[in-house]
Amino acid sequence: MTFISEIEKRRTFAIIAHPDAGKTTLTEKLLLFGGAIQSAGAVKSNKIKKTATSDFMEIEKQRGISVATSVMTFEYGGRKINILDTPGHKDFAEDTYRTLTAVDSVILVIDCVKGVEEQTEKLMEVCRMRDTPVIVFVNKMDREGKDPFDLLDELEQKLSIKVRPITWPVNGGSSLKGVYHLLEEKMNYFKVNKTKLEDDVKAIPLDSEELENSVGDKDASQLREDVEMINTIYDSFNQEEYLGGHVAPVFFGSAVNSFGIKELLDTFCQISPAPIARMTNVRKVEPTEKKFSGFIFKIHANIDPRHRDRIAFLRICSGTFERGKFYKHVRLNKDLRFSNPYMFMADSKEVVEEGYPGDVVGLYDTGNFKIGDTLTEGESMYFTGIPSFSPELFREVVNTDPLKAKQLDKGVSQLAEEGVAQLFTLQPGNRKVIGTVGELQFEVIQYRLLNEYGASCRFEARPYSKACWITSEDPAKLAEFIRLKSNYIAYDKDENPVFLAETDWILRMNKENNPDIEFHTTSEFK
Ligand code: G4P
Protein backbone atom coordinates (compact mmCIF):
# COMPACT_ATOMS: atom_id res chain seq x y z
CA MET A 1 0.00 0.00 0.00
CA THR A 2 1.34 3.43 -0.87
CA PHE A 3 2.02 6.17 1.67
CA ILE A 4 -0.87 8.24 0.28
CA SER A 5 -3.38 5.39 0.43
CA GLU A 6 -2.30 4.65 4.02
CA ILE A 7 -3.25 8.23 4.91
CA GLU A 8 -6.51 8.20 2.97
CA LYS A 9 -7.52 5.02 4.71
CA ARG A 10 -7.34 6.50 8.21
CA ARG A 11 -10.19 8.01 10.19
CA THR A 12 -9.26 9.37 13.62
CA PHE A 13 -12.14 10.60 15.76
CA ALA A 14 -13.56 10.83 19.26
CA ILE A 15 -17.00 10.07 20.62
CA ILE A 16 -18.15 12.77 23.01
CA ALA A 17 -21.24 13.02 25.16
CA HIS A 18 -22.71 14.21 28.39
CA PRO A 19 -22.22 11.36 30.90
CA ASP A 20 -24.77 8.55 30.51
CA ALA A 21 -25.88 9.47 27.01
CA GLY A 22 -24.41 6.19 25.73
CA LYS A 23 -20.83 6.89 24.64
CA THR A 24 -19.46 3.64 26.05
CA THR A 25 -22.28 1.56 24.58
CA LEU A 26 -21.86 3.14 21.16
CA THR A 27 -18.07 2.68 21.24
CA GLU A 28 -18.59 -0.95 22.05
CA LYS A 29 -21.06 -1.45 19.22
CA LEU A 30 -18.70 0.17 16.73
CA LEU A 31 -15.94 -2.18 17.89
CA LEU A 32 -18.29 -5.14 17.52
CA PHE A 33 -19.14 -4.11 13.96
CA GLY A 34 -15.46 -3.68 13.25
CA GLY A 35 -14.74 -7.17 14.59
CA ALA A 36 -12.31 -5.70 17.12
CA ILE A 37 -14.14 -7.33 20.02
CA GLN A 38 -16.34 -10.41 20.00
CA SER A 39 -18.90 -9.67 22.68
CA ALA A 40 -20.58 -6.78 24.41
CA GLY A 41 -19.07 -5.87 27.76
CA ALA A 42 -15.52 -6.36 26.53
CA VAL A 43 -14.66 -2.69 26.67
CA LYS A 44 -13.66 -1.67 30.15
CA SER A 45 -14.65 1.91 30.07
CA ASN A 46 -12.71 4.37 32.14
CA LYS A 47 -15.89 6.14 33.03
CA ILE A 48 -16.67 6.94 36.61
CA LYS A 49 -20.30 6.53 37.41
CA LYS A 50 -20.38 8.13 40.80
CA THR A 51 -18.29 11.00 42.03
CA ALA A 52 -16.66 8.95 44.79
CA THR A 53 -12.89 8.89 44.84
CA SER A 54 -12.96 5.20 45.57
CA ASP A 55 -14.51 4.59 42.15
CA PHE A 56 -11.77 6.52 40.51
CA MET A 57 -9.10 4.67 42.45
CA GLU A 58 -10.69 1.38 41.52
CA ILE A 59 -10.36 2.41 37.93
CA GLU A 60 -6.81 3.55 38.49
CA LYS A 61 -6.00 0.03 39.65
CA GLN A 62 -7.09 -1.22 36.28
CA ARG A 63 -4.99 1.37 34.63
CA GLY A 64 -3.35 -1.12 32.31
CA ILE A 65 -6.76 -1.56 30.78
CA SER A 66 -7.66 2.09 30.61
CA VAL A 67 -4.35 2.88 28.90
CA ALA A 68 -5.25 0.32 26.27
CA THR A 69 -8.68 1.81 25.81
CA SER A 70 -7.24 5.29 25.30
CA VAL A 71 -7.16 4.52 21.60
CA MET A 72 -9.13 1.78 19.93
CA THR A 73 -8.26 0.78 16.42
CA PHE A 74 -10.14 -1.39 14.00
CA GLU A 75 -10.65 -1.88 10.29
CA TYR A 76 -14.04 -1.49 8.70
CA GLY A 77 -15.26 -0.81 5.19
CA GLY A 78 -11.74 -0.36 3.87
CA ARG A 79 -10.91 2.19 6.56
CA LYS A 80 -8.53 2.05 9.49
CA ILE A 81 -10.51 3.64 12.27
CA ASN A 82 -8.89 5.12 15.39
CA ILE A 83 -11.33 5.98 18.16
CA LEU A 84 -9.76 8.18 20.83
CA ASP A 85 -11.43 7.60 24.15
CA THR A 86 -12.39 10.53 26.34
CA PRO A 87 -13.22 10.43 30.06
CA GLY A 88 -16.91 10.24 30.83
CA HIS A 89 -16.72 12.31 33.99
CA LYS A 90 -17.13 16.06 33.67
CA ASP A 91 -14.41 16.71 36.26
CA PHE A 92 -11.95 15.44 33.68
CA ALA A 93 -13.37 17.52 30.86
CA GLU A 94 -10.03 19.15 30.18
CA ASP A 95 -8.61 15.79 29.22
CA THR A 96 -11.43 15.51 26.71
CA TYR A 97 -10.77 19.00 25.33
CA ARG A 98 -7.15 18.07 24.72
CA THR A 99 -8.03 14.79 23.08
CA LEU A 100 -10.18 16.80 20.68
CA THR A 101 -7.02 18.51 19.43
CA ALA A 102 -5.77 15.15 18.17
CA VAL A 103 -8.82 14.05 16.16
CA ASP A 104 -10.04 14.92 12.69
CA SER A 105 -13.74 14.61 13.49
CA VAL A 106 -16.20 13.85 16.26
CA ILE A 107 -19.37 11.86 16.88
CA LEU A 108 -21.54 13.56 19.47
CA VAL A 109 -24.01 11.33 21.32
CA ILE A 110 -27.27 12.83 22.61
CA ASP A 111 -29.85 11.14 24.81
CA CYS A 112 -33.24 11.59 23.07
CA VAL A 113 -35.01 11.91 26.42
CA LYS A 114 -32.72 14.56 27.85
CA GLY A 115 -31.76 16.39 24.68
CA VAL A 116 -28.79 18.77 24.75
CA GLU A 117 -27.18 18.74 28.21
CA GLU A 118 -24.66 21.02 29.89
CA GLN A 119 -21.56 19.05 29.00
CA THR A 120 -22.75 18.64 25.40
CA GLU A 121 -22.73 22.40 24.98
CA LYS A 122 -19.23 22.82 26.40
CA LEU A 123 -17.82 20.05 24.22
CA MET A 124 -19.40 21.55 21.14
CA GLU A 125 -17.84 24.91 21.93
CA VAL A 126 -14.43 23.27 21.77
CA CYS A 127 -15.31 21.61 18.45
CA ARG A 128 -16.47 24.93 17.03
CA MET A 129 -13.20 26.63 18.03
CA ARG A 130 -11.43 24.31 15.64
CA ASP A 131 -14.24 23.84 13.07
CA THR A 132 -14.09 20.11 13.77
CA PRO A 133 -16.62 18.19 11.66
CA VAL A 134 -19.34 16.78 13.92
CA ILE A 135 -21.84 13.96 13.37
CA VAL A 136 -24.68 13.75 15.90
CA PHE A 137 -26.06 10.41 17.04
CA VAL A 138 -29.39 10.69 18.86
CA ASN A 139 -29.40 7.66 21.13
CA LYS A 140 -31.95 5.76 23.22
CA MET A 141 -34.69 5.99 20.61
CA ASP A 142 -36.18 2.88 22.23
CA ARG A 143 -37.30 5.21 25.02
CA GLU A 144 -40.15 7.70 24.91
CA GLY A 145 -38.10 10.76 24.12
CA LYS A 146 -38.59 14.21 22.67
CA ASP A 147 -40.11 14.64 19.23
CA PRO A 148 -37.32 14.25 16.62
CA PHE A 149 -38.15 17.57 14.92
CA ASP A 150 -38.03 19.35 18.30
CA LEU A 151 -34.70 17.68 19.02
CA LEU A 152 -33.27 18.96 15.75
CA ASP A 153 -34.41 22.50 16.62
CA GLU A 154 -32.86 22.16 20.07
CA LEU A 155 -29.57 20.99 18.56
CA GLU A 156 -29.47 23.97 16.22
CA GLN A 157 -30.29 26.48 18.93
CA LYS A 158 -28.16 25.21 21.76
CA LEU A 159 -25.17 24.05 19.75
CA SER A 160 -25.18 26.92 17.21
CA ILE A 161 -24.74 24.60 14.26
CA LYS A 162 -26.97 23.75 11.29
CA VAL A 163 -28.18 20.16 11.32
CA ARG A 164 -29.23 17.78 8.55
CA PRO A 165 -30.87 14.44 9.37
CA ILE A 166 -29.41 11.46 7.50
CA THR A 167 -31.49 8.76 9.16
CA TRP A 168 -34.96 9.14 10.61
CA PRO A 169 -36.71 7.02 13.23
CA VAL A 170 -39.86 5.14 12.33
CA ASN A 171 -42.02 5.49 15.39
CA GLY A 172 -40.21 5.62 18.72
CA GLY A 173 -40.07 4.28 22.24
CA SER A 174 -41.08 0.65 22.54
CA SER A 175 -42.63 0.81 19.05
CA LEU A 176 -39.39 1.87 17.31
CA LYS A 177 -39.44 -0.08 14.08
CA GLY A 178 -36.34 1.04 12.30
CA VAL A 179 -34.71 4.00 10.65
CA TYR A 180 -35.22 5.47 7.22
CA HIS A 181 -31.98 6.36 5.45
CA LEU A 182 -32.61 9.70 3.78
CA LEU A 183 -29.61 9.48 1.43
CA GLU A 184 -30.10 5.86 0.40
CA GLU A 185 -33.88 6.41 0.31
CA LYS A 186 -34.85 3.19 1.99
CA MET A 187 -36.07 2.12 5.34
CA ASN A 188 -34.07 -0.31 7.41
CA TYR A 189 -36.66 -2.28 9.28
CA PHE A 190 -35.58 -3.99 12.46
CA LYS A 191 -37.73 -7.01 13.07
CA VAL A 192 -36.57 -7.90 16.53
CA ASN A 193 -34.20 -6.65 19.15
CA LYS A 194 -31.06 -7.77 17.48
CA THR A 195 -28.75 -10.15 19.15
CA LYS A 196 -26.47 -10.57 16.19
CA LEU A 197 -25.35 -7.51 14.36
CA GLU A 198 -26.07 -8.75 10.88
CA ASP A 199 -29.53 -9.95 11.91
CA ASP A 200 -32.84 -8.91 10.60
CA VAL A 201 -32.40 -5.69 8.77
CA LYS A 202 -34.64 -5.41 5.75
CA ALA A 203 -34.23 -2.44 3.41
CA ILE A 204 -37.58 -1.18 2.13
CA PRO A 205 -38.07 1.64 -0.43
CA LEU A 206 -40.33 4.48 0.74
CA ASP A 207 -42.86 4.11 -2.06
CA SER A 208 -43.25 0.34 -1.92
CA GLU A 209 -46.29 -1.45 -0.56
CA GLU A 210 -43.96 -3.50 1.56
CA LEU A 211 -43.62 -0.48 3.83
CA GLU A 212 -47.30 -0.77 4.83
CA ASN A 213 -46.93 -4.52 5.20
CA SER A 214 -43.95 -4.15 7.49
CA VAL A 215 -44.71 -1.17 9.70
CA GLY A 216 -48.45 -0.74 9.27
CA ASP A 217 -50.48 1.95 7.48
CA LYS A 218 -50.17 4.59 10.18
CA ASP A 219 -46.40 4.49 10.54
CA ALA A 220 -45.91 4.22 6.78
CA SER A 221 -47.89 7.36 6.05
CA GLN A 222 -46.30 9.21 8.99
CA LEU A 223 -42.86 8.34 7.63
CA ARG A 224 -43.73 9.58 4.13
CA GLU A 225 -45.04 12.81 5.65
CA ASP A 226 -41.89 13.24 7.77
CA VAL A 227 -39.58 12.63 4.83
CA GLU A 228 -41.40 15.21 2.76
CA MET A 229 -41.19 17.69 5.61
CA ILE A 230 -37.45 17.07 6.12
CA ASN A 231 -36.73 17.55 2.44
CA THR A 232 -38.69 20.82 2.51
CA ILE A 233 -37.15 22.25 5.69
CA TYR A 234 -33.54 21.16 5.36
CA ASP A 235 -31.11 21.78 2.51
CA SER A 236 -29.84 18.61 0.95
CA PHE A 237 -26.76 17.17 2.63
CA ASN A 238 -23.54 18.84 1.54
CA GLN A 239 -20.33 17.06 2.47
CA GLU A 240 -18.20 20.18 2.10
CA GLU A 241 -20.33 22.00 4.65
CA TYR A 242 -19.95 19.09 7.04
CA LEU A 243 -16.17 18.97 6.55
CA GLY A 244 -15.99 22.71 7.24
CA GLY A 245 -17.81 22.21 10.56
CA HIS A 246 -20.86 24.18 9.36
CA VAL A 247 -23.48 21.45 9.28
CA ALA A 248 -23.85 18.38 11.47
CA PRO A 249 -25.42 15.27 9.93
CA VAL A 250 -27.81 13.64 12.42
CA PHE A 251 -28.49 9.93 12.93
CA PHE A 252 -31.11 8.34 15.16
CA GLY A 253 -30.88 4.95 16.85
CA SER A 254 -30.45 2.91 19.96
CA ALA A 255 -26.91 1.86 20.79
CA VAL A 256 -27.89 -0.80 23.29
CA ASN A 257 -30.12 -2.51 20.71
CA SER A 258 -27.67 -1.94 17.83
CA PHE A 259 -30.38 0.03 15.99
CA GLY A 260 -29.11 2.60 13.53
CA ILE A 261 -25.43 1.89 14.25
CA LYS A 262 -24.50 0.31 10.95
CA GLU A 263 -26.10 3.22 9.12
CA LEU A 264 -24.01 5.59 11.25
CA LEU A 265 -20.77 3.69 10.73
CA ASP A 266 -21.22 3.17 6.98
CA THR A 267 -21.95 6.84 6.39
CA PHE A 268 -19.14 7.87 8.73
CA CYS A 269 -16.72 5.82 6.61
CA GLN A 270 -17.94 7.57 3.48
CA ILE A 271 -18.11 11.19 4.58
CA SER A 272 -15.71 11.75 7.49
CA PRO A 273 -12.35 13.40 6.85
CA ALA A 274 -9.06 11.57 6.37
CA PRO A 275 -6.17 13.10 8.40
CA ILE A 276 -6.19 16.85 7.87
CA ALA A 277 -3.44 19.48 7.63
CA ARG A 278 -2.40 21.06 10.93
CA MET A 279 -1.03 24.48 11.87
CA THR A 280 2.32 25.09 13.49
CA ASN A 281 3.82 28.35 14.66
CA VAL A 282 5.61 28.71 11.32
CA ARG A 283 3.52 26.99 8.67
CA LYS A 284 0.79 24.53 7.82
CA VAL A 285 1.85 20.88 7.79
CA GLU A 286 0.16 18.58 5.26
CA PRO A 287 -0.21 14.91 6.23
CA THR A 288 1.25 13.90 2.87
CA GLU A 289 4.62 15.54 3.59
CA LYS A 290 7.38 12.94 3.56
CA LYS A 291 9.02 14.10 6.79
CA PHE A 292 7.55 12.93 10.05
CA SER A 293 5.97 15.31 12.57
CA GLY A 294 3.55 14.88 15.46
CA PHE A 295 2.56 16.17 18.89
CA ILE A 296 1.82 14.86 22.36
CA PHE A 297 -1.81 15.35 23.42
CA LYS A 298 -2.04 13.12 26.45
CA ILE A 299 0.25 11.69 29.09
CA HIS A 300 -0.73 8.70 31.13
CA ALA A 301 1.10 7.89 34.36
CA ASN A 302 1.94 4.43 35.41
CA ILE A 303 0.12 3.96 38.68
CA ASP A 304 2.76 1.57 40.03
CA PRO A 305 4.79 3.80 42.38
CA ARG A 306 7.97 1.82 41.74
CA HIS A 307 7.89 2.82 38.09
CA ARG A 308 7.63 6.52 37.58
CA ASP A 309 7.46 6.04 33.82
CA ARG A 310 4.62 7.36 31.78
CA ILE A 311 3.11 6.82 28.38
CA ALA A 312 2.95 9.87 26.15
CA PHE A 313 0.40 9.69 23.35
CA LEU A 314 1.67 11.00 20.06
CA ARG A 315 -0.64 11.99 17.21
CA ILE A 316 1.21 11.58 13.92
CA CYS A 317 0.57 14.59 11.68
CA SER A 318 2.84 13.97 8.68
CA GLY A 319 5.30 11.45 7.25
CA THR A 320 6.04 8.00 8.57
CA PHE A 321 6.97 7.45 12.20
CA GLU A 322 9.56 4.68 12.52
CA ARG A 323 10.55 2.64 15.53
CA GLY A 324 14.11 3.26 16.71
CA LYS A 325 14.70 6.35 14.56
CA PHE A 326 15.91 9.63 16.11
CA TYR A 327 13.42 12.51 16.15
CA LYS A 328 13.80 16.04 17.36
CA HIS A 329 12.03 17.04 20.56
CA VAL A 330 11.58 20.68 19.60
CA ARG A 331 11.08 22.23 23.05
CA LEU A 332 14.13 20.50 24.50
CA ASN A 333 16.09 20.79 21.24
CA LYS A 334 17.16 17.21 21.77
CA ASP A 335 17.07 14.07 19.62
CA LEU A 336 15.16 11.15 21.06
CA ARG A 337 14.37 7.71 19.79
CA PHE A 338 11.79 5.20 20.86
CA SER A 339 12.59 1.53 20.82
CA ASN A 340 9.16 0.29 21.90
CA PRO A 341 6.43 2.48 20.46
CA TYR A 342 2.97 1.05 21.05
CA MET A 343 -0.22 1.02 19.12
CA PHE A 344 -3.49 0.13 20.75
CA MET A 345 -6.11 -2.38 19.78
CA ALA A 346 -9.51 -2.62 21.46
CA ASP A 347 -8.19 -4.47 24.48
CA SER A 348 -4.46 -4.86 23.97
CA LYS A 349 -1.38 -3.01 22.81
CA GLU A 350 1.48 -4.07 20.59
CA VAL A 351 4.88 -2.73 19.58
CA VAL A 352 4.77 -1.22 16.10
CA GLU A 353 7.46 -0.68 13.49
CA GLU A 354 5.82 2.35 11.90
CA GLY A 355 2.83 4.64 12.01
CA TYR A 356 1.15 7.00 9.54
CA PRO A 357 -0.64 10.34 9.80
CA GLY A 358 -3.81 9.91 11.83
CA ASP A 359 -2.31 7.16 13.96
CA VAL A 360 -1.73 7.50 17.68
CA VAL A 361 1.42 5.96 19.10
CA GLY A 362 2.19 5.44 22.78
CA LEU A 363 5.75 6.35 23.75
CA TYR A 364 7.43 5.37 26.99
CA ASP A 365 8.48 8.54 28.72
CA THR A 366 10.72 9.09 31.68
CA GLY A 367 9.83 12.76 32.05
CA ASN A 368 10.75 14.34 28.73
CA PHE A 369 7.28 15.26 27.62
CA LYS A 370 4.72 17.89 28.41
CA ILE A 371 1.34 18.08 26.77
CA GLY A 372 1.63 19.94 23.47
CA ASP A 373 5.26 18.95 22.78
CA THR A 374 6.17 18.51 19.11
CA LEU A 375 8.44 15.87 17.56
CA THR A 376 9.85 16.42 14.05
CA GLU A 377 12.45 15.06 11.69
CA GLY A 378 14.59 18.13 12.35
CA GLU A 379 12.44 21.19 11.70
CA SER A 380 12.03 23.67 14.53
CA MET A 381 8.30 24.23 14.72
CA TYR A 382 5.56 23.37 17.13
CA PHE A 383 1.92 22.52 16.56
CA THR A 384 -0.54 25.12 17.74
CA GLY A 385 -4.14 24.73 18.80
CA ILE A 386 -3.50 22.74 21.97
CA PRO A 387 -4.49 25.37 24.51
CA SER A 388 -5.19 25.23 28.21
CA PHE A 389 -8.60 26.52 29.19
CA SER A 390 -9.39 28.63 32.22
CA PRO A 391 -10.04 26.38 35.22
CA GLU A 392 -13.05 26.99 37.45
CA LEU A 393 -11.79 25.98 40.90
CA PHE A 394 -8.58 27.21 42.49
CA ARG A 395 -6.82 25.94 45.60
CA GLU A 396 -3.44 26.61 47.12
CA VAL A 397 -1.30 23.58 47.87
CA VAL A 398 -0.17 23.54 51.50
CA ASN A 399 2.55 21.11 52.49
CA THR A 400 1.68 19.06 55.58
CA ASP A 401 4.97 17.17 55.81
CA PRO A 402 7.95 19.56 55.97
CA LEU A 403 10.37 16.70 55.32
CA LYS A 404 8.79 16.00 51.98
CA ALA A 405 8.74 19.48 50.45
CA LYS A 406 10.88 18.46 47.49
CA GLN A 407 8.75 15.43 46.69
CA LEU A 408 5.65 17.60 46.85
CA ASP A 409 7.12 20.16 44.45
CA LYS A 410 8.17 17.48 42.03
CA GLY A 411 4.87 15.65 42.23
CA VAL A 412 2.81 18.77 41.72
CA SER A 413 4.78 19.85 38.68
CA GLN A 414 4.81 16.39 37.13
CA LEU A 415 1.08 16.00 37.58
CA ALA A 416 0.62 19.40 35.97
CA GLU A 417 2.76 18.31 33.01
CA GLU A 418 0.60 15.24 32.68
CA GLY A 419 -2.36 17.58 32.46
CA VAL A 420 -4.13 16.27 35.55
CA ALA A 421 -4.68 19.90 36.57
CA GLN A 422 -3.20 23.31 35.87
CA LEU A 423 -0.51 24.77 38.04
CA PHE A 424 -0.12 28.48 38.72
CA THR A 425 2.70 29.94 40.79
CA LEU A 426 2.06 33.07 42.83
CA GLN A 427 4.89 35.46 43.63
CA PRO A 428 6.40 36.28 46.01
CA GLY A 429 6.81 33.08 47.96
CA ASN A 430 6.52 30.61 45.11
CA ARG A 431 3.08 29.62 46.33
CA LYS A 432 1.40 27.01 44.17
CA VAL A 433 -2.21 27.24 43.16
CA ILE A 434 -3.89 24.36 41.39
CA GLY A 435 -6.74 25.03 39.00
CA THR A 436 -9.25 22.37 38.01
CA VAL A 437 -12.67 22.04 36.45
CA GLY A 438 -14.00 19.70 39.14
CA GLU A 439 -13.69 18.61 42.78
CA LEU A 440 -12.67 15.10 41.88
CA GLN A 441 -9.43 16.28 40.34
CA PHE A 442 -8.25 17.57 43.75
CA GLU A 443 -8.96 14.23 45.36
CA VAL A 444 -7.06 12.43 42.64
CA ILE A 445 -4.08 14.78 42.99
CA GLN A 446 -3.95 14.34 46.75
CA TYR A 447 -4.16 10.56 46.40
CA ARG A 448 -1.52 10.39 43.71
CA LEU A 449 0.88 12.76 45.52
CA LEU A 450 0.74 10.50 48.54
CA ASN A 451 0.92 7.20 46.69
CA GLU A 452 3.37 8.04 43.95
CA TYR A 453 5.54 10.72 45.57
CA GLY A 454 5.09 10.08 49.29
CA ALA A 455 4.06 13.71 49.74
CA SER A 456 1.09 14.86 51.75
CA CYS A 457 -0.70 18.14 51.37
CA ARG A 458 -3.98 19.86 51.94
CA PHE A 459 -5.72 22.40 49.76
CA GLU A 460 -6.83 25.84 50.80
CA ALA A 461 -9.60 27.36 48.75
CA ARG A 462 -8.71 30.52 46.86
CA PRO A 463 -11.51 32.84 45.86
CA TYR A 464 -10.65 33.07 42.15
CA SER A 465 -13.18 32.02 39.56
CA LYS A 466 -11.32 32.58 36.32
CA ALA A 467 -7.75 32.62 35.03
CA CYS A 468 -6.97 34.93 32.10
CA TRP A 469 -3.68 34.85 30.26
CA ILE A 470 -2.54 38.47 29.82
CA THR A 471 -0.56 40.10 27.04
CA SER A 472 0.05 43.62 25.77
CA GLU A 473 1.68 45.17 22.73
CA ASP A 474 3.43 47.48 25.15
CA PRO A 475 5.76 45.50 27.48
CA ALA A 476 6.03 48.44 29.88
CA LYS A 477 2.25 48.56 30.33
CA LEU A 478 2.15 44.81 30.94
CA ALA A 479 4.93 45.07 33.53
CA GLU A 480 3.10 47.95 35.24
CA PHE A 481 -0.18 46.00 35.35
CA ILE A 482 1.63 42.99 36.82
CA ARG A 483 3.24 45.22 39.45
CA LEU A 484 -0.03 46.89 40.44
CA LYS A 485 -2.03 43.67 40.56
CA SER A 486 0.70 41.48 42.03
CA ASN A 487 -1.72 39.78 44.44
CA TYR A 488 -3.74 38.52 41.49
CA ILE A 489 -0.93 37.55 39.15
CA ALA A 490 0.38 34.03 38.82
CA TYR A 491 2.58 32.26 36.28
CA ASP A 492 1.52 29.16 34.39
CA LYS A 493 3.72 26.10 33.73
CA ASP A 494 5.37 27.90 30.81
CA GLU A 495 5.98 31.07 32.87
CA ASN A 496 3.26 33.06 31.12
CA PRO A 497 1.57 35.67 33.34
CA VAL A 498 -2.03 34.99 34.27
CA PHE A 499 -4.55 37.29 35.94
CA LEU A 500 -6.68 35.50 38.54
CA ALA A 501 -10.07 37.15 38.78
CA GLU A 502 -12.36 36.64 41.75
CA THR A 503 -15.56 37.45 39.91
CA ASP A 504 -16.74 38.18 36.38
CA TRP A 505 -17.43 41.73 37.49
CA ILE A 506 -13.83 42.24 38.67
CA LEU A 507 -12.58 40.83 35.39
CA ARG A 508 -14.82 43.19 33.44
CA MET A 509 -13.67 46.21 35.46
CA ASN A 510 -10.03 45.30 34.92
CA LYS A 511 -10.60 44.96 31.21
CA GLU A 512 -12.34 48.34 31.06
CA ASN A 513 -9.71 50.12 33.14
CA ASN A 514 -6.76 48.60 31.29
CA PRO A 515 -7.47 48.89 27.57
CA ASP A 516 -3.82 48.17 26.72
CA ILE A 517 -3.92 44.77 28.34
CA GLU A 518 -5.45 41.83 26.51
CA PHE A 519 -7.18 39.14 28.56
CA HIS A 520 -7.39 35.65 27.05
CA THR A 521 -9.49 32.78 28.41
CA THR A 522 -7.30 30.14 26.79
CA SER A 523 -3.53 29.90 26.85
CA GLU A 524 -3.23 30.18 23.09
CA PHE A 525 -3.82 33.51 21.46
CA LYS A 526 -1.41 33.90 18.60
P1 G4P B 1 -21.76 6.97 28.81
O1 G4P B 1 -20.56 6.17 28.42
O2 G4P B 1 -22.12 8.04 27.82
O3 G4P B 1 -21.73 7.51 30.19
O4 G4P B 1 -23.03 5.99 28.77
P2 G4P B 1 -23.16 4.41 28.73
O5 G4P B 1 -22.87 3.87 27.39
O6 G4P B 1 -22.51 3.78 29.90
O7 G4P B 1 -24.74 4.32 28.90
C1 G4P B 1 -25.40 4.84 30.04
C2 G4P B 1 -26.63 4.02 30.33
O8 G4P B 1 -27.52 4.11 29.21
C3 G4P B 1 -26.32 2.53 30.49
O9 G4P B 1 -27.26 2.02 31.40
C4 G4P B 1 -26.65 1.96 29.12
O10 G4P B 1 -26.98 0.59 29.15
C5 G4P B 1 -27.83 2.81 28.71
N1 G4P B 1 -28.03 2.88 27.26
C6 G4P B 1 -27.09 3.04 26.29
N2 G4P B 1 -27.67 3.04 25.07
C7 G4P B 1 -28.98 2.89 25.28
C8 G4P B 1 -30.12 2.80 24.40
O11 G4P B 1 -30.01 2.86 23.19
N3 G4P B 1 -31.33 2.65 24.99
C9 G4P B 1 -31.48 2.57 26.34
N4 G4P B 1 -32.73 2.42 26.80
N5 G4P B 1 -30.45 2.64 27.20
C10 G4P B 1 -29.22 2.78 26.66
P3 G4P B 1 -26.91 1.78 32.93
O12 G4P B 1 -28.12 1.19 33.56
O13 G4P B 1 -26.36 3.03 33.53
O14 G4P B 1 -25.72 0.78 32.86
P4 G4P B 1 -25.74 -0.73 32.45
O15 G4P B 1 -25.82 -1.43 33.74
O16 G4P B 1 -26.90 -0.98 31.56
O17 G4P B 1 -24.44 -0.89 31.75
Image (cartoon, rainbow, N blue to C red):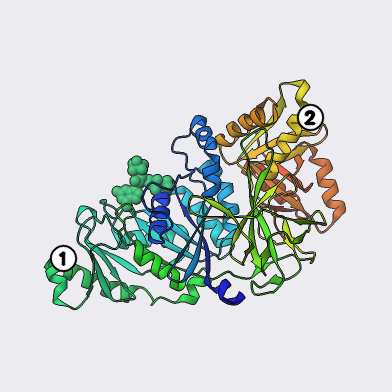
**Left or right relative to 309: residue 29:** left
Using the image, tell me which numbered label, if any, was put on residue 215: 1
Residue 505, by quadrant, is top right
The answer to whether any part of residue 199 appears in the image is yes
Amino acid carrying mark 1 in the image: Val
The answer to whether any part of residue 113 appears in the image is no
Using the image, tell me which numbered label, if any, was put on residue 50: none
Residue 250, by quadrant, is bottom left
**Left or right relative to 396: residue 232:** left
In the image, what residue occupies the spot 68% across and 25% down? 456
Give neighbour class at mark 2: few <14, some 14-19, many 20+ (Cα, 10 Å): few
- In the picture shown, does residue 451 fall above or below 79? above
In the image, what residue occupies the spot 61% across and 29% down? 447
Q: Position of residue 140 (x, y in %)?
A: 32, 53
Amino acid carrying mark 2 in the image: Lys
Secondary structure of residue under mark 1: helix
In the image, what residue occupies the spot 31% across and 55% down? 254
210, 229: nearer the viewer:
210
Q: Position of residue 236 (x, y in %)?
A: 38, 77
**Left or right relative to 3: residue 59:** left
128, 320: nearer the viewer:
320
- In the picture shown, does residue 449 fall above or below 210? above
In the image, what residue occupies the spot 48% across and 71% down? 242
Question: Which quadrant would the N terminus be assigned to in this image?
Answer: bottom right
In the displayed image of the protein, which residue is found farthest to the right?
476
- In the picture shown, does residue 236 fall above or below 80? below
241, 327: nearer the viewer:
327
The residue beneath circle 2 is 406
Give neighbour class at mark 1: few <14, some 14-19, many 20+ (Cα, 10 Å): many
119, 59: nearer the viewer:
59
